[in-house]
Every structure is written in C-alpha cells, then in structure tokens.
Image (cartoon, rainbow, N blue to C red):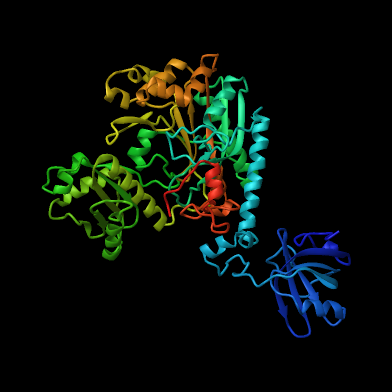
Amino acid sequence: MYRTHSCGELRLQHRGQQVTLAGWVQRIRNLGGMTFIDLRDRYGITQLTIDENTPDDVRKTAATLGRECVLQATGTVLERRSKNPKIPTGDVELALARITLLNAAETPPFTIEDDSDGGEELRARFRYLDLRRNPLQKAITLRHRMAQEVRSYLDSQQFLEIETPFIIKSTPEGARDFVVPSRMNPGEFYALPQSPQTFKQLLMVAGYDRYFQIVRCFRDEDLRADRQPEFTQIDCEMAFVEREDILQTFEGLAKHLFKSVLGVAWTDNFPRMSYADAMACYGSDKPDIRFDMRLNELTATVKGKNFTPFDTAEYTGGICVQGCADFTRKQLDELAEWVKRPQIGAKGLVYIRWTNDGIKSSIDKYYTSDELSAIAAQCRAAPGDLILLLSGDKKKTRERLGALRIEMGNRLGMRPNNVFAPLWVYDFPLLEWDDATQRFYAMHHPFTAPKPEDLPKFYSANRDDIAQVNANAYDFVLNGVEIGGGSIRIHDASVQQRMFEVLGFSESEANYKFGFIINAFRYGAPPHGGVAFGFDRWCALFGGQETIRDYIAFPKNNTGRDVMLDAPSKIDDAQMTELCLKSEIK
C-alpha cells in the first residue's frame, strides 16, 4: 500500500510505530546536520526528519527534492524535540528510513500556502494547484459536509432525491438560456436548465409529493461575486401544502445545518418581514438585520424650506448612524462621493451632525436648529449621532439609502461573518411592469401563484389593479444575502392560462412554450409549492466569505471564462457543419 496513515493522523500515541505516509512536499528546511521535510496531504502536514542516522540513499534522494514533489515516506514516529502547537501533528515527527520519489514536480508558479503569492488570474489558470491550498480544501470540505447534511435532513422528512434532465426546451422568460444545438434535429436547439422548475411541478402531478435535488443550473447572465454561469441549487417541492408548511419545513433544514455544520443551536423561530416593510425600513428586499440603522421617511417634514432637492423630490429619507457625529469633513466628503458612484447613482448627500456644540448640517442655511432637531427626532437620533439623507425617486432613493446603510455597516464593523441573522421575506409583488416593452414580467417566474385574496385584482382589466397583486412567494435571507426563494405554485390550468395572458403571451405562444405543463394540470394537479436555495452562496456564508468561487471546485471568472481550460472556445468547421451552424465572426 502507498500509505498506512494520512499526514494529519499521527499523534503521540503512535510513538515507536513504523508507518508509511504519502503526499506532497510543502517545504524543505536544510539546517546542515539535519533536514526537515514537511509532507502534506489534504488531512494535514507531518514533519519528516533526516539526521546522521538516516540511510545514505534517503539523504541522496532528499537532496533532489523540490516543492510539490510527490513522495512515499516510511519511518518511525518519534516525539518532536521542538514541538509545533499550531498544527495537530506538531508533537511528533517521522524519522525517515526509506523514501520513494513517486513523481517529480516543477516549481509551481505560486506558493501553495494559506496566503499565496499568486494573483487571482494566475491561480485560476492553475486551479488544480490552487485547490491544494488549505483554505480551498476547507471550503470544498465544508461544501461536502453541507451536502451530506442536506440529504440527511430531507431524507428524514420523506423527500425523494430525483434527477431531472439537463437538456430541455428553451423558455427564455428569466435570464438568458445557454442553448445546445441538436445534430439529430438540424436547426433545433435544447437549452440547459435555469432551474428544474417545470419538472419538479410535473413530479407533484405525478404523485411524488416530496422531491429534492442538489442540482446544477445554468444562466447566461452578467457575473459578480455571488454569481456563476453554472451554479448549484438545493431544489425542493412539496404537494398538499400551504406557505406555512413550507416555511416550517425549510426553517427546519436551516436549523439542522446551523447545528450540524456550525454547532449553532437555534431554538427561536426565524423573524419574518413583508416585502413592503423590507423596502420601507431597509431599502432592500434582502435586508441584513445584524444591525439596525433603519430608513426613516422624511418627505413631508423637509418640504417647503426652499431647498430644491427636497422640495421637488418624491421621497426624502435618512439613516441615523449612532455615535458618528465626530466624522470629519473629509470622511463626509468621501461618503458624498461614494453615493455619486455610477453603481449608486445619487446626486448628492446631506448630513446632520448632533455634536456637543449642537446640531450642525450641510443645509444650515435652509433649516433652523429647531427644524433640524425635528428631523433628528424623526430619525430617532441622540447626541453623538450622524444623520445621512438622500432624496429623489422613491424606489431608487430607498435602494440607495439601503446601499449606504450597508456601506456604513461595513465601515463600522457591524457585519461580522461569524454572526448570523436569518430572515423570511414574503408577499413580493407578483408582476413588474416594463415601460420599454409595455408589458408585465413575472417577478419570480410564470408559475408563481397570486395571493388568494388578490385573485379579483389578478383577473381585473385594469393595469393598476394587476400591478397591486402580491405573489404567494417567500425568500430566505441570511446576513443580507438571498439564500433561497420559492412560492406556492399555480395548480389550476385556468389560473395558469390567465398568468400567460397577463404576461402578454398569445394562446398559441403559451401552448408552444408551456403546453406540456398546462396539459398536465388538467389531469389532477395537487396544490403544491417549493423553494430553491443557492447552495454555493449558503456554503460561502457558512465559510465566512462573500465570494462563492472558493466553494466551487472549478469556477469561471468574471467574464464567464474558464481560464484553465481556455473555454469557451471555437469549434472547427467540420463540427459547425455537422451541427448546421455558421459563424459570422471572423
């Protein structure tokens, strides 16, 4: 056998035993009379020792070694003379009796250390080397552990894990599809699934009342830290349920993961918040409730003082930043520039500081001290606090204040990654009107059911009535990140037909794209609903990170490229011809 133990396994109780290890050379320290080799595998590091008692052939082989060479090492476990309390194997070392070079290695392009000297692009090109580093091994191990615990919990709740197809019909209603040409059906295309949405609903029709799948999904969308063109969902569906059944079941899943993976026991129910309250109080449909700093509407209070930005604005709001009245003019100017960035889009920032010398503001010439005090009182401010105000379009200004709130939370250390604040957000708008195309779009997807009490408005001929319909939908939010979302589904064929009508589909178009599910509903579809969790995001948050890349073995970069494989890439003319494709790009 290549090894009797792993490189992270040996302890003092193994003293005197002859063992064989195998792994990669982490580092070599030649101290003249003695040489130390740190041998690494994914379980840990063990120090190998060469001294005057080591056989000559071992010394000779060791002299040829470099970093990342693959070794087999046999020797006797000894208690270390100079112990290393920073590693679990730090009390022992292996006195070498035999060493075999299994494979030589070129010097890697960056150091395989926790803090590597390789840049992100370089490490992506050599991802197989980057994956040897301890932080990534911990991330991938955490992902594995979470996947096993998800399966364990859902199995205990009578869910069946059922696979669904990866090449399906294109239904471009959400993000862009990745399409796949069909050689056997020239001129026709499959699509890679953005989610298994229709299949899991069909499984409910088929009588499999509790389904789940840890499944790969694909969306051709612009990327950021928490998005990849291919990603993994914990996809779930249940039949004969209402919203409360689903929230209770999957709150149970979250609590199980907190306990089994992080050792955090959660006994209280997760807080809940309507979409309307989330937007009004936090300027976001995925609020981070680890800290307060809520939005306060000031529109009526600040109007009529000849300050044009406030007088003409649909909405003026402010946040109270406790204990920050001592912000310098430089710091305030930096914040003013920050909100003007294209990503935020505000035209300016107003501040009020409540110092020991009284209330001071950038709008002193327009507002009296009493009027500024009234604003401060409405923001629940106290001496020592800083108030930041924005104005403009209601929806956009709330969102900008929400972004400013998060920025202040980051600057003030209010968002520690080892503190967790779960939240359910519910009652989202069902539809969103787009002026450019003059039509409604589904906020979630076309299979989301309206709230039962909103059905009269859903069938109204009045556009304003339809716009007020709420979805029987819900999101699971953790630390300001949307981890999952779902809804009670439409199970009545006539209601589904009305949804397609509201979305502007002709009957023939709806039948062409979704006829299979409309027909299925005619054969006894049960009431059903479900949820899908972003598994990569959940893993990253549990690992204390914002980016999901370290929790995916082979991720893409910000432009959707795999720089290790150099993909996507062109295909040759013969393949293009076989697939009945032609390219206009030279």
Residue 210 in view, yes or no: yes
Q: Is residue 138 above or below residue 150?
A: below
**Which residue occupies the foreground of this view, 282 or 573?**
573
Q: Is residue 511 above or below residue 176?
A: above
Q: Position of residue 34 (x, y in %)?
A: 78, 81
Q: Residue at x 56, y 28 (%)?
A: 199
**Which residue occupies the foreground of this view, 566 or 258?**
566
Asked whether, in this view, residue 429 is left or right of residue 255, the answer is left
Q: How many marks?
A: 0
Asked whether, in this view, residue 362 is left or right of residue 92, the answer is left
Q: Is residue 484 above or below residue 70?
A: above
Q: Quadrant of the C terminus?
A: bottom left
Asked whether, in this view, residue 202 is left or right of residue 175, the answer is right
| Identity of the residue furthest to the bottom in this view | 32
**Which residue occupies the foreground of this view, 313 or 537?**
537
Q: Position of residue 534 (x, y in %)?
A: 53, 41
Q: Quadrant of the N terminus?
A: bottom right
Q: Position of residue 321 (x, y in %)?
A: 33, 52
**Which residue occupies the foreground of this view, 372 or 147?**
147
Q: Position of residue 331 (x, y in %)?
A: 30, 63
Residue 54 in view, yes or no: no
Q: Residue at x 26, y 43 (%)?
A: 378
Q: Residue at x 46, y 16 (%)?
A: 493
| Identity of the residue furthest to the left in this view | 306
